[in-house]
Image (cartoon, rainbow, N blue to C red):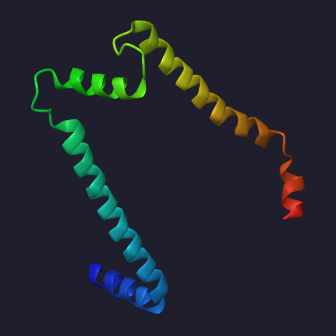
Amino acid sequence: MLINDLRLALRQLHKNLGFALAVILTLALGVGVNTAVFSLVDGFLLRPLPYPEPDRLAVLRVLRSELYGVRDYDPLTLTIVPIILAVIAAAASFLPTLRITRIDPSTTLRTE
């Protein structure tokens, strides 16, 4: 049964060679990107840095580079900045959704 399924699959792929190549390239690209991303995550996030208190070191370095002239341990800054970024992200996702809800789908489909 499995051999018949494999033969049928190979026949279909041979019929649609362009589709087969697109599928194979997509799978190869997906595996390659997945491997690269995992390597980066493993190297930067999963393995600890060879310093004492590596979590604090990385956070302080990022905060110093991003917040010019602000102390990196300021609790007010560490509270307000994520809230502001969350509000901006919510607005960036909500405003286009609000605009789309005003469009009548039947009118849009008739014009296309």
Residue lying furthest front = 69
Residue 100's place in the image compared with 21, above or below, is above
- On the picture, is 103 further left or further right than 52? right
Q: Which sits in the foreground, 56 or 87?
A: 56
Q: Residue at x 31, y 56 (%)?
A: 34
Q: Residue at x 14, y 33 (%)?
A: 49
Task: Assign the N terminus to one quadrant of the image.
Answer: bottom left
Q: Is residue 4 left or right of residue 43?
A: right
Q: Depth check: 7 or 37 in front?
A: 37
Question: What residue is rendered at 27% in x and 83% in y?
Answer: 3
Looking at the image, residue 43 lies above or below residue 33 = above
Q: Position of residue 80 (x, y in %)?
A: 50, 14
Q: Position of residue 9 (x, y in %)?
A: 38, 83
- The answer to which of 66 and 39 lies nearer the viewer is 66
Residue 112 image offset from top left, x and y in percent: 84, 65
Choose top left, top right, bottom left or bottom right for residue 5.
Answer: bottom left
Residue at point 43% right, 82% down? 20
Name which quarter of the figure residue 33 lies in.
bottom left
From this view, report whether residue 24 is shown above or below residue 83.
below
Residue 52 at x, y percent in the picture: 10, 22
68 to 10, vertically: above or below: above
